[in-house]
Image (spheres, helix red, strand yellow):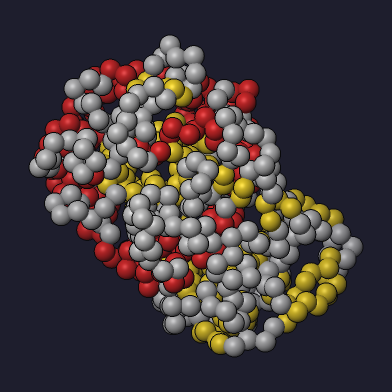
Amino acid sequence: MPSFVTALPVVALFIRLSVCLSDSTVQVQLPSSVPSYNVIQDNFPGISLEFNVVNHLIGSSPSSVPTPMVNYLKNLRSRMSSDFRLRVGGNSLDGSFYNPSASQMINFNIASTSNGVENIPVTYGPQILSTLKQLSSDVGGIYHLLGLSLIYPSNDTDVINFAQAAEQALGSSLDSFLVGNEPDLYEENHKRPPNYTVTDYSGELNKVVGDLHQASVGTTLGAPSLCCNHPNWGLADVLTATHNTNAINQLKYASLQHYPQESCDSNGVDRWNISYLTNHTAVQALMTTFQADGVLMARNAGKQVIMDEFNTASCGGQPGRSDTFAAAMWTVDYELGMAAHNYSAAYVHTREPGVAYDIFTYPNTSSAENSGWTTGPQYYSLLLLTEALSTLGSSSSGSVVVDLNLPNPTTTWGYAIYDSSSLSGAPRTLVLANTGTSSTTFVLPSGLAPTSMLKSVVRTMSAPSVTEKSNIKYAGQSVDGTGTIQGKHSQTTLSCSGGCNVQVSGPSVALVVLQTQSSGTLRAVSMPCVSLFVASFLGSVSLMGLGAIW
């Protein structure tokens, strides 16, 4: 397994310190007690791939896995102690058919009345499994979440065959199957007759789950992957309807999907403003309004809750909003918000070229390419998140995330991330955001780091403005069209045992790693302000950061 902790013997290490003028000050107050009910692992953030373009994203065979995809995922996997979460599914999978004799991975040979690429079904062959297995090997470990169709519950032979093939091919790297996709929209999308109800859905789910069980496959499943807030179609309604059924007993995950904004108007009407993505109160509202009762019910029933697909806005997002730095900041906020509110994993979705919210985009050609990809703003979110949650190289059993509820949430927000085994102590990391245009100083209290700690470190995800689409950096570095991290690594070092000030220019998100031993690891972050260079004479220092250049 690749590691991003590298021991560097040095005589003098030059560390950049930032000196900035600040226009506002925010006092950071830590919670008096930390809840222990939702412990997450450091592979909490995952990626979701739309099924019918997966041959472009991962290649059409084990020998054609695109180098950029390997690099993109390896950058993230190397920051984790656990295998990276990858989901393959979506609307295009729900209605597609598995053909074990197919010579190609994806075949567009099924008629569709849909206008959206994400709804076009396909037939698919076993190459998808062998290619996923190769990708996992190339990346250093992937935890696979695979969709199963629920469109034809009375004729699910191909579903059973695919599940059997997947379990045999992927083995322990197969996390779970997701049965169905957005059943709350089946009627609206003409996949079911009028007046289709949760009771109807429960019967269909129970039938397919029963068939999987009889075939001795699909021992871990996820459902219902609801997307919306339709009346009588909540997660709580589904859990109630499936109570004491084979379906509910087989569920490992209670799964959801969500796009908080909608961009499906064919006339291109602007339905929402970019300020939605920079206002922390919008994320806080999602935690209390979207399926909150069902999430709590699922957790109380012993089920893990996952967001198996999300992004800024439905139908590919909105250009000028979903493809901006504002979306990158929002993704960090939403992921950590879910981590703080009973979710166990969250997968940000990506599709084909031309989609505004893509994390990364392959060239618009007939086959996967090894260069010329485009890195989307939200990829930088994942770089920051994987470092913020990382327990690599430690004995930690997980993390607990807490919203700091900072003042002025329209322009500032923050989270504290604690080691689950020491909730009474100081947090391991802080994530502090300034979505405004001027600098903000976050005043951290004393006691965050014992005097035995050598340094606390800060890195930032930054851009010139919230509308920026390409000039985005994390820790001073960018990611090129091969998925390779480029540029000089940049971070700021602080001493926070007696309290300290973290100055964050606007707009940017700062990762502050507080607990760094004098003989251990320096982890996290920077600020784009006036810089001084100070020499620190050490015997050796360990630096965390894939692609760091010193």
* Quadrant placement of the C terminus: bottom right
Instruction: Give the answer, above or below, for where 182 lies relative to 97.
Output: below
Q: Residue at image x 27%, y 47%?
A: 226
Outermost residue on the front side: it is 267
In the picture provided, is 137 more to the left or to the right than 300?
Answer: right
Q: Residue at image x 77%, y 52%?
A: 7
Q: Can residue 418 be seen in this snapshot?
A: no
Instruction: Give the answer, above or below, for where 257 lies relative to 400.
Output: above
Residue 103 in the image, given as x and y percentages of width and height: 49, 14
Residue 355 in the image, given as x and y percentages of width and height: 48, 48
Residue 316 in the image, given as x and y percentages of width and height: 42, 49
Task: Return the residue nearer the eye: 377 or 383.
Answer: 377
Task: Return the residue nearer the eye: 338 or 49.
Answer: 49
Task: Return the residue nearer the eye: 545 or 428.
Answer: 545
Q: Residue at image x 67%, y 45%?
A: 481
Outermost residue on the right side: it is 11
Residue 55 in the image, given as x and y percentages of width and height: 52, 29
In the picture provided, is 301 more to the left or to the right than 467?
Answer: left
Q: Can residue 533 be seen in this snapshot?
A: yes
Residue 116 lies in what quarter of the image?
top left
Instruction: Give the answer, above or below, for where 415 lies relative to 268.
Output: below
Instruction: Give the answer, above or below, for where 397 lies relative to 98.
Output: below
Number of disc labels = 0
* Quadrant placement of the N terminus: top right
Q: Residue at image x 49%, y 68%?
A: 416
In the picture provided, is 225 more to the left or to the right than 543?
Answer: left
Task: Return the residue nearer the eye: 274 or 217.
Answer: 274
In the picture provided, is 167 more to the left or to the right than 67?
Answer: left
